[in-house]
Image: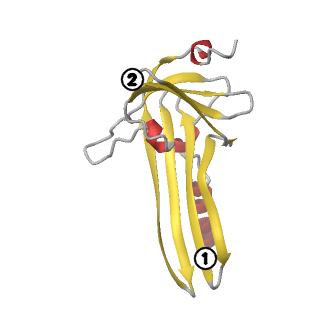
Amino acid sequence: MKSIVTFLIIPLLASCAANPENTRRSVPNPQMAMTFENSSIKKDSASTVETLTSLFKLGDSAVEKVTVHFDDRGQLHLDFEDTYGRRSNYGFGGKFRKKHYEYSIRNSHKGIPPFYWITDVERLRVWVEPDGTLIVERYFNRSGMILLMAGGASDKKCYRFKSVANANRSNLNPSKS
């Protein structure tokens, strides 16, 4: 009997061990203002390169650097200048979680579960690693069900953005003194 209990307890204790991927995360500092390259770091030949502006649905591919900072209300702001010299500043209302900042692009759940159900979720999680690399995790889930027949797709990808230099917030927002 003792061996059965021991056999069951050891896997439970092992599952409670700290995950090294999650322990490296640090919540973005609300006072943070850092500049990152707009193109993600390519891990290998199979990985895709995504831009920070396209992840936030801004679609400006002619941007080299993006400055990320938070305002007093906890909104994430992306400041950038395109190749034509036009400055842009976009704010995104999300929430600070334990180890990341979370911004929902879409979060829709409709229907009556046994008969009809549609889920459309797309969210971004943002955190900074100790080496200054910005990580943006994109998650989406689009699925549906009609009378017990279900289908859909979901995906989760992490994109890494290299830090260029610390930014001075007074240079980014001339209206704020």
Image disc number at residue 117 = 1
Considering the numbered disc 2 on the image, is that residue within a helix, a strand or a loop? loop
Find residue 41 and report its horizontal and vertical position in percent: 36, 35
Q: Is residue 5 left or right of residue 40?
A: right
Whether residue 92 is situated above or below residue 119 in the rendered picture: above
In the rendered image, the residue lying farthest to the right is 73
Examine the rendering and report whether any part of residue 113 can be seen: yes
The residue depicted at 65 percent of the width and 76 percent of the height is 111
Q: Give the residue displayed 57% in from the left and 55% down from the top.
A: 14
Closer to the camera, 78 or 151? 78
Q: Residue at x 43, y 32 (%)?
A: 161
Find residue 17 and name its label: none
- Residue 72 placement: quadrant: top right
Residue 16 spot, x, y in % from top left: 62, 53
User: Circle 2 sits on which residue?
Assistant: 84
Q: How is the image coloured?
A: secondary structure
Measuring from the top left, give residue 153's x and y in whole percent.
46, 67
Contact (Cβ within 8 Å) of mark 1 with mark 2: no
Sequence-first tag of 1 and 2: 2
Residue 25, position as x, y percentages in the image: 57, 37
Mark in front: 1 vs 2: 2
Q: Nearer the viewer, residue 11 or 159?
A: 159
On screen, residue 159 versus residue 78, left or right, reads left
